[in-house]
Amino acid sequence: MTLSPHLSELAFAAGAGERLIATVEFSDFPPPAREVPRIGDAFRLDVERIATLSPDLVIAWDSGNPRAAVEQLRSLGINVWSVEIRSPAEIADVLELVGKAAGSAGTAKTRAELVRRRLDHLKRQYRNVITLDYFYQVGARPLFTLNGSHLVSQGLRLCGGNNVFDQEPGLAFQVSYESVIVANPDALFAPYSKGGENPLSTWREWPAMRAVRNDALFLLPADGISQATPRFLDSLEIACKLLHQLRKRRNDEQPSD
């Protein structure tokens, strides 16, 4: 049983989808995940229903699920494993652990190794590149971002991206537009779902900002960059390529601040 959409996706990626007896709302990838019974959503769990299903293992989202509900499950004698993926490498590690627990170790190991090879390629490709500062916008109203410990920041660091709020203590937190303008990043990133409004369009009201001047308002596929699963690498590779194209443009144009 998994208690978040990304953990459900990881279970399927590890070859354990057939053993998944329940998950939470919004678990929609891969498509077979949509057929798995629901036991609430990541923030409101049906503890009674979970207990009735008597799972061998519940995989919980450490920073997302309500701690009281998770502790209640443990108090009922249910085996709960809390997971928090903070780096791209941990995606591969968790894949293997899920596979071992579910009896699909071979499949999980193969897919974990693919993740590791892709990460190694990124590290080699962007070794010794010039660092570029960026701001990652989680939401616009209110304006939310991430610190340097978040998976997204750890991923972008592999290709020379420096989060302008890297040292802030909170994993995700609200900031002011003024603080971003003062930080003056080289690029802005935001998750984007097809058909939605451009979440970065407001920033064009500040044409003197380096990112706006660079035309570096980058949108990333929300269903990849927002999930701690192998699909995260798809969006990360796009982000790294965008940063590198910006480096080349800056080098060719040699802009002055």
Image (tube, helix red, strand yellow):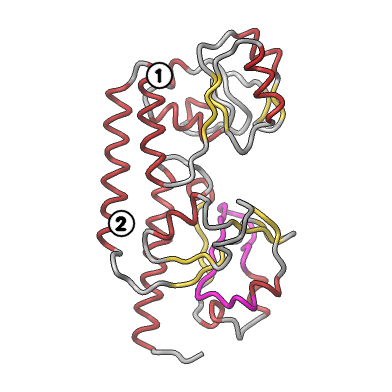
Q: Position of residue 8 (x, y in %)?
A: 51, 29
From what the image shows, is residue 149 above or below residue 186? above
Give amino acid for label 2: Leu
Q: Position of residue 107 (x, y in %)?
A: 30, 26
Is 176 within the magenta? no
Quarter in which the N terminus is drawn: top right
Residue beneath the point at 43% across and 59% down: 156
Q: Is residue 177 visible?
A: yes
Q: Residues within 10 Å of mark 1 (few under 14, many from 20)?
A: few
Is 196 within the magenta? yes
From what the image shows, is residue 122 above or below residue 72? below
Measured in 3D between alpha carbons, the distance from the residue under mark 1 to the one under mark 2, in whole angstroms, is 29 Å
Tag 2 residue: 122
Q: Quadrant of residue 241?
A: bottom left
Tag 1 residue: 101
Residue beneath the point at 36% across and 70% down: 244
Q: Nearer the viewer, residue 81 or 121?
A: 81
Residue beneath the point at 42% across and 60% down: 157
Query: Element at badge 1?
Result: helix
Where are the magenta residues, as a range?
Answer: 181-200
Give amino acid for label 1: Ala
Q: Quadrant of residue 247?
A: bottom left
Q: Are marks 1 and 2 in contact (CB under 8 Å)?
A: no
Q: Position of residue 150 (x, y in %)?
A: 53, 51
Q: Position of residue 99 (x, y in %)?
A: 37, 23
Q: Nearer the viewer, residue 153 or 9?
A: 153
Residue beneath the point at 44% across and 72% down: 132
Residue at the bottom extreme of this rendering: 256
